[in-house]
Image (cartoon, helix red, strand yellow):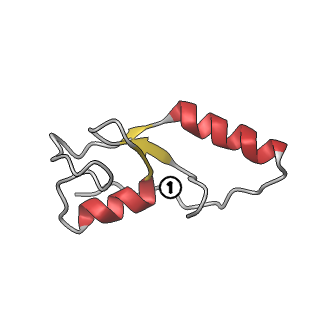
């Protein structure tokens, strides 16, 4: 239950924080954790609109977002 830092969109259209959903996928899951739908692919698309909204909200509320190292590509 933390503020998303790097929101991405899964094939189902649901948004997740990259670190969390990548961990889910790396554990071998092939479904969306919320909808249970089987994934057609496991590409993660950056959700720039959500990221911008999070940054704006954090600035307005004097919240410092945690900094994470850039994600490493998975093989």
Q: Residue furthest top?
A: 49
In what element is the residue under mark 1? Answer: loop
Question: Which residue lies at the image location 43% right of the left edge and 60% below the top edge?
Answer: 19
Task: Relative to 59, say whether 75 is above or below.
Answer: below
Quadrant of the snapshot with the C terminus:
bottom left
**For the residue carrying disc 1, how many other residues have a C-alpha within 10 Å: few (<14), some (14-19), or many (20+)?**
few
Task: Tell which of 75 and 30 is nearer to you.
Answer: 30
Whether residue 6 sits left or right of residue 24 in the image: it is right
Question: Which residue lies at the image location 64% right of the left edge and 60% below the top edge?
Answer: 67
List the residue tagged with mark 1.
Answer: 70
Q: Residue furthest front?
A: 35
* Rendered location of residue 26, percent (x, y): 25, 64
Q: Residue furthest bottom?
A: 27
Question: Which residue lies at the image location 73% right of the left edge and 42% below the top edge?
Answer: 57
Quadrant of the snapshot with the N terminus:
bottom right
Where is residue 66, by image quadrant?
bottom right
Whether residue 67 sits left or right of residue 31 in the image: it is right
How many badges with numbers are in the image? 1
Question: Which residue lies at the image location 34% right of the left edge and 58% below the top edge?
Answer: 22
Whether residue 67 sits left or right of residue 28 in the image: it is right
* Rendered location of residue 70, percent (x, y): 50, 55
Task: Tell which of 65 and 34 is nearer to you.
Answer: 34
């Amino acid at each position: 239950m933390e503020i998303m830092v790097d929101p991405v969109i899964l094939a189902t259209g649901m948004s997740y924080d990259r670190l969390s959903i990548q961990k889910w996928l790396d554990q071998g899951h092939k479904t969306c954790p919320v909808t249970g739908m089987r994934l057609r692919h496991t590409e993660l698309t950056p959700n720039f609109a959500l990221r911008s909204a999070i940054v704006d909200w954090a600035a307005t509320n004097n919240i410092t977002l945690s900094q994470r190292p850039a994600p490493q590509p998975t093989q």
